[in-house]
Structures are given as structure tokens and as C-alpha cells.
């Protein structure tokens, strides 16, 4: 396998066609050292070279050099990548693997014809639902009615769910919350002296599945002297689209959010979902070639802050309410969401918050930085590998002895809740911000 760049004078023989192609200079930074093998979730599970970053880059080089076309087998190996970015952290050559894979997937979507069912699902989800907040709300409302009215129970018991289009995916639907988080231009003002003014992302999935957690974010911020503005015109950040190669729709969604978040002057843009935060911080890269939005995109990227990161930098009020029960501390472990711990490099602030909460015994689990297998839409389209990684994560949670696993991303929460339930384990999955909010309120109640 070649590790040297093709001479610049050589004629282009690449089989990467179309307007978006992966940058060859990024491919040829890889020297095949193998450091990435020890941290790649799919390689750890399979031991297959083609399921490693090094192997996937070798396939990219083969296409770039015209030695092969973009075949179903090659696309299958690229699709297996979770884009967790673990390889970037250990790569001594600085290969920007995330950027490389995103461009590769964008190219695949331009030139490769997927199966009819997947094409339909992708078109509906990425182009019909996620970019349209009102449509997302309607679908969310219908799904919540289906889950809470008893229809879901009937459909499953009678087997009717198997007859519906996409019925095999029904069991992977997240449980929608009783209350959706509303982005209506509201301003949440603190009762104490204002220390900062921020805008806040509601997002798409988290807004429907974990609305109360977003409410907790506003309470925690207000308690710490932060005025929170929730722009009405915002929508999905585009993360799922970016990771799936749907670049055009992702850029449209980014522009919408840029306009929404720059309409008022704020000190920061707060993001509570790790995947969304990672994408928004990279808006500048996503729209680098857009003369109208490049500068504004970079500004939004610089202003975007993960909630744990922001609280750590601001300095947060020490919570006083104990999470202990009958004098016994609550044992809590932490799962580093890939796009927080790896893509954003934020590992200390979440732990700082957990250590600050009274009545918590914090324990580290093995492989806390190994992906849980959620990966956005990965759990829908790559079910077998997603389930294998979920079982691996469940084993590590159970081995830690923790009663609660804390995390910072809706996909991780949903994935681990379902995995623990399948395994018959009783550990709870909770957001760090919910634990902090609960401790604040317990302290208030205790006087």
C-alpha cells in the first residue's frame, strides 16, 4: 500500500468524481503506523484491517489512485466507521480523519447508488424532516402519541409493527419525552447579578427526547448568573447530515443557525448535546468556501461552548444537596461522549462537575472513551456493529459497579438505556446537568 503522495506532475487518475472529493493531501499524511488500531471501536471488535482508520484510508488511496472504483464492499467499510475521532487523538502524523471521512461520504452520496429503502429513509430524514423544525415537531407529536396511547403496545403484541414500512427499525425508536423543549425566542433571566449573556441551542433530537434536561440547563445557567436567550429561528445543527455525507443540506442548516444566533450579541452559544457542539464549532470549516457566510460561520464556531466547558470556565456555584440515600453515596461512572471527549477534547469539565456534587462516589469505568455504538444514525443503518458496541459498553458499566452512568449526549443516553434494558441491568443513564440541577434543588429544599 502506497504511503507516498502521487507526484504532482502525474495525470489525475482518481475515481473520486463530483464536486466534493476527499483531499488527497490528508490521505497521504497517513504513514500506516497503526497507533489508531488500538483505539478504533470497529477494529477492536473485529480485528479486521479494513475496519480500521488505516485500512479505510488505504481504500481511499486505492480509489484516488484509480486502482479501484467505489464499490459496494468499499462503501460498506466506510459506512462502518462511527466517526468517533478516537484515531485523531493518537495519530502522530496529525491525519484529520474526521474531515477526510466526511468528504469521502459526501463523495459517495454523489456517485454511489444505495438501495431503495435506504435512499428513501435518508431523503426523508436528512432532507425532509431534520431541516424543518415544524415538520419535526409534528412527527415528534405523532410518535409520542403512538408511544403513550397504547398503540405501540398493541402494534408490537399483534405483530402489526412488522408490516409497516421500516417496521424493523421501530424497536430502536427513542422514547419521546412528556414535554418537548420549545424554542420560542424566550429569555430566561437570573435572579442574581448577571455575569454573562448567552444564546442556547435547542437542537432536534434532544429537544424531543430530553426536553426537561434542556430546561435544567436554563435553570443551572440562571442560577449561576447567566441570562439565556433561546432563538426562535434556530433549527437542527446539521450534525447528522454532515456525518452522513449530506453536505448540501448540512450547509443550509448551518446558515439558518448562523443567522439565528448572530441576530443578538451574546458572550457564548451554549450547546448541551456533544454531537451538536462539535459540529457547530466546525461551522467555519463547513462553510469555508462560502464568501457570504465563511466569516460568520467561524464566529459562531468560536462562540460555541459545551455547557460543561462553559460552567467550568465561568466558575459555578458549589451544589449543596446530597445525592446519598440513607448515608450511602450514589456510585456514578461517566461515559465520555465521542464528540465531547474526542472531537472537542473536553474530558475534565464533566468530571469536575460530578466531583463537586455531594453524595456522589465517582468511579471511572474501563474504556470510557470507546464509542457506545450510537453514532447518530449509525444505530439504525449499522445495527449489528452498533449492538456489539452497546454490549461492550454495558459490560464496562456493570463492571464499574455504578448505579448511574452519566453522559452528555442524547444519542449516548438512548443507546445505553436500551442496551442496559436488553441486558436486564438496573443502572440508570443520566445527564450530568440533570444531576447538578437535582443537587441544587435538594440543597434549596434543605434550606
Image (tube, helix red, strand yellow):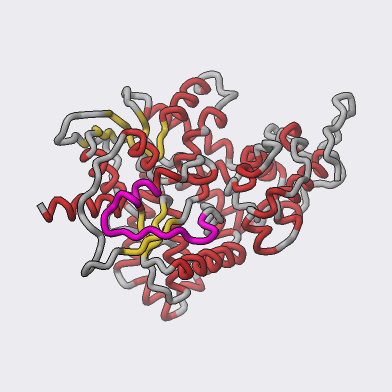
Q: So how many labels did they put on this image?
A: 0
Residue 43 relative to residue 280: left or right: right
Q: Is residue 77 above or below residue 60?
A: below
Q: Is residue 29 above or below residue 402?
A: above
Q: Is residue 378 above or below residue 353?
A: below
Residue 390 image position (x, y, % from top left): 53, 65
| Residue found at x 37% / y 25% | 262
Residue 354 visible in the displayed image: yes
Q: Quadrant of residue 220?
A: top left
| Residue found at x 53% / y 53% | 369
Q: Quadrant of residue 182?
A: top left
**Residue that protrudes farthest toward the right in the picture:** 10
Residue 133 among magenta residues: no
Q: Is residue 291 above or below residue 441?
A: above
Residue 191 image position (x, y, % from top left): 14, 36
Q: Nearer the viewer, residue 122 or 244?
A: 244
| Residue found at x 82% / y 37% | 14
Residue 22 image position (x, y, % from top left): 70, 36
Residue 355 among magenta residues: yes
Q: Nearer the viewer, residue 436 or 211?
A: 436
Residue 143 visible in the displayed image: no
**Residue that protrudes farthest toward the bottom in the picture:** 158
Residue 203 relative to residue 103: left or right: left
Q: Quadrant of residue 48?
A: bottom right
| Residue found at x 76% / y 44% | 60
Residue 132 image position (x, y, % from top left): 42, 42
Q: Which residues, given as a range, are shown in magenta?
A: 351-368
Amino acid at each position: 500500500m502506497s504511503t507516498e503522495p502521487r507526484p504532482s506532475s502525474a495525470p489525475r487518475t482518481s475515481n473520486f468524481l463530483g464536486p466534493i472529493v476527499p483531499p488527497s493531501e490528508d490521505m497521504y499524511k497517513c504513514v500506516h503506523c497503526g497507533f489508531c488500531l488500538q483505539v478504533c471501536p470497529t477494529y477492536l471488535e473485529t480485528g479486521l484491517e479494513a475496519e480500521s482508520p488505516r485500512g479505510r484510508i488505504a481504500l481511499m488511496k486505492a480509489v484516488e489512485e484509480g486502482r479501484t472504483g467505489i464499490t459496494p464492499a468499499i462503501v460498506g467499510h466506510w459506512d462502518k466507521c462511527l466517526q468517533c475521532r478516537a484515531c485523531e487523538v493518537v495519530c502522530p502524523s496529525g491525519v484529520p480523519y474526521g474531515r477526510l471521512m466526511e468528504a469521502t461520504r459526501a463523495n459517495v452520496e454523489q456517485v454511489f447508488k444505495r438501495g431503495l429503502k435506504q435512499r428513501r429513509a435518508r431523503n426523508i430524514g436528512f432532507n425532509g424532516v431534520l431541516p424543518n423544525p415544524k415538520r419535526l415537531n409534528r412527527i415528534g407529536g405523532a410518535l409520542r402519541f403512538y408511544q403513550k396511547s397504547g398503540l405501540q403496545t398493541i402494534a408490537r403484541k399483534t405483530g402489526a409493527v412488522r408490516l409497516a414500512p421500516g417496521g424493523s427499525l421501530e424497536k430502536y425508536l427513542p422514547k419521546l419525552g412528556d414535554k418537548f423543549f420549545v424554542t420560542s425566542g424566550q429569555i430566561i433571566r437570573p435572579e442574581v447579578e448577571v455575569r454573562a449573556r448567552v444564546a442556547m441551542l435547542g437542537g432536534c433530537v434532544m429537544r424531543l427526547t430530553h426536553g426537561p434536561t434542556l430546561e435544567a440547563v436554563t435553570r443551572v445557567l440562571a442560577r449561576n448568573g447567566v441570562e439565556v436567550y433561546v432563538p426562535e429561528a434556530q433549527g437542527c445543527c446539521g450534525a447528522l447530515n454532515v456525518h452522513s455525507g449530506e453536505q448540501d443540506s448540512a450547509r443550509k442548516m448551518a446558515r439558518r443557525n448562523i443567522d439565528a444566533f448572530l441576530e443578538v450579541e451574546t458572550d457564548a452559544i451554549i450547546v448541551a448535546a456533544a454531537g451538536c457542539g462539535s459540529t457547530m464549532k466546525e461551522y467555519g470549516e463547513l462553510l469555508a468556501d462560502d464568501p457570504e457566510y465563511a466569516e460568520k460561520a467561524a464566529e459562531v464556531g468560536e462562540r460555541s461552548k459545551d455547557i460543561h466547558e462553559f460552567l467550568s470556565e465561568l466558575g459555578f456555584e458549589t451544589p449543596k444537596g446530597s445525592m446519598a440515600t440513607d448515608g450511602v453515596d450514589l456510585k456514578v461512572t461517566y461515559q465520555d461522549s465521542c464528540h465531547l471527549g474526542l472531537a472537542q477534547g473536553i474530558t475534565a469539565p464533566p468530571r469536575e462537575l460530578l466531583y463537586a456534587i455531594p453524595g456522589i462516589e465517582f468511579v471511572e469505568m474501563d474504556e470510557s472513551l470507546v464509542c457506545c455504538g450510537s453514532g447518530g444514525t449509525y444505530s439504525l443503518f449499522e445495527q449489528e456493529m452498533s449492538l456489539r458496541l452497546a454490549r461492550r459498553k454495558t459490560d464496562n458499566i456493570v463492571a464499574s459497579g455504578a448505579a448511574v452512568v452519566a453522559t452528555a449526549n442524547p444519542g449516548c443516553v438512548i443507546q445505553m438505556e436500551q442496551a442496559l434494558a436488553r441486558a436486564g441491568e438496573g443502572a440508570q443513564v443520566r445527564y450530568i446537568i440533570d444531576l447538578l440541577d437535582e443537587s441544587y434543588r435538594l440543597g434549596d429544599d434543605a434550606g
